[in-house]
Image: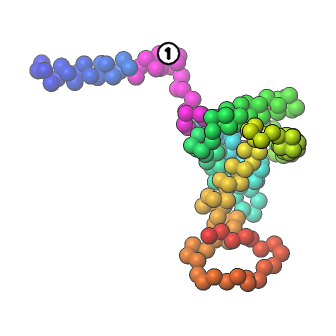
């Protein structure tokens, strides 16, 4: 055996030791997929379901089609202050806990009607919280979820092209476009 073969075999053995240790310590279960430092895939799936309850599929695709859960995870990690990140993360757990108290099941196991009723009550709660909120306190977690759902959906390809009237290359400015009730808004 030459030196090159010996080094490559040692590298294989050591690599197997490092990689195999993770599975040995986790009981040979694959770890929950992390989306980023703050969220795992289960949380992103829950955020997609929450978003789809806020903006469900109708004649246009819903929020889940725009993958608003991944958008929320990215925005919270990259743009929110640590205190807001903490409120948002705790809110995900609290949402499921409150849902268990009300319906004896987690949010994803609820029917569409139960989800809508639950989020409607949660929206009322966040509105009351906002009325008495002090200047430096973070927003209610559901307000953050709702705002991020709307932002993520209407800035996505699905939201811009399917829910809004999309003009990829704007033409001349026309400040007097006729509008009929029920027309879609414009996205540029």
Assign the magenta stretch its main secondary structure.
loop
Q: Secondary structure at mark 1?
A: helix
In this rendered view, identify the residue nearer to me: 44 or 37. Answer: 37
Q: Residue at x 77, y 41 (%)?
A: 135
* Name of the residue lying farthest toward the front: 135
Residue 114 horizontal side relative to residue 40, left or right: right
**Residue linked to disc 1:** 25
The boundaries of the magenta stretch are: 19-39
Residue 158 percent coordinates (x, y): 63, 60
Residue 61 percent coordinates (x, y): 69, 58
Q: Residue at x 64, y 45 (%)?
A: 72
- Residue 107 on the magenta span: no
Q: Residue at x 78, y 34 (%)?
A: 95
Res 104 quadrant in image: top right
Residue 12 percent coordinates (x, y): 29, 23
Residue 132 horizontal side relative to residue 50, left or right: right
């Amino acid at each position: 055996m030459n030196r090159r073969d010996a080094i490559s075999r040692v590298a294989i053995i050591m690599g197997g030791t490092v990689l195999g240790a993770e599975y040995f310590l986790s009981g040979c279960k694959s770890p929950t997929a992390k989306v980023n430092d703050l969220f795992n895939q289960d949380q992103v799936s829950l955020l997609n379901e929450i978003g789809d309850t806020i903006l469900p599929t109708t004649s246009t695709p819903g929020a889940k089609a725009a993958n608003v859960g991944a958008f929320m995870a990215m925005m919270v990690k990259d743009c929110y202050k640590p205190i807001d990140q903490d409120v948002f993360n705790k809110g995900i757990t609290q949402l499921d806990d409150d849902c268990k108290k009300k319906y004896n099941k987690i949010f994803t196991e609820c029917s569409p009607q139960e989800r809508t009723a639950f989020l409607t009550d949660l929206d009322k709660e966040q509105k009351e919280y906002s009325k008495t909120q002090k200047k430096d306190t973070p927003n209610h977690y559901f307000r953050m979820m709702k705002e991020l759902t709307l932002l993520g959906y209407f800035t996505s390809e699905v939201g811009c092209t399917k829910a809004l009237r999309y003009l990829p290359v704007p033409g001349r400015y026309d400040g007097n476009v006729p509008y009929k009730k029920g027309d879609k808004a414009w996205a540029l």
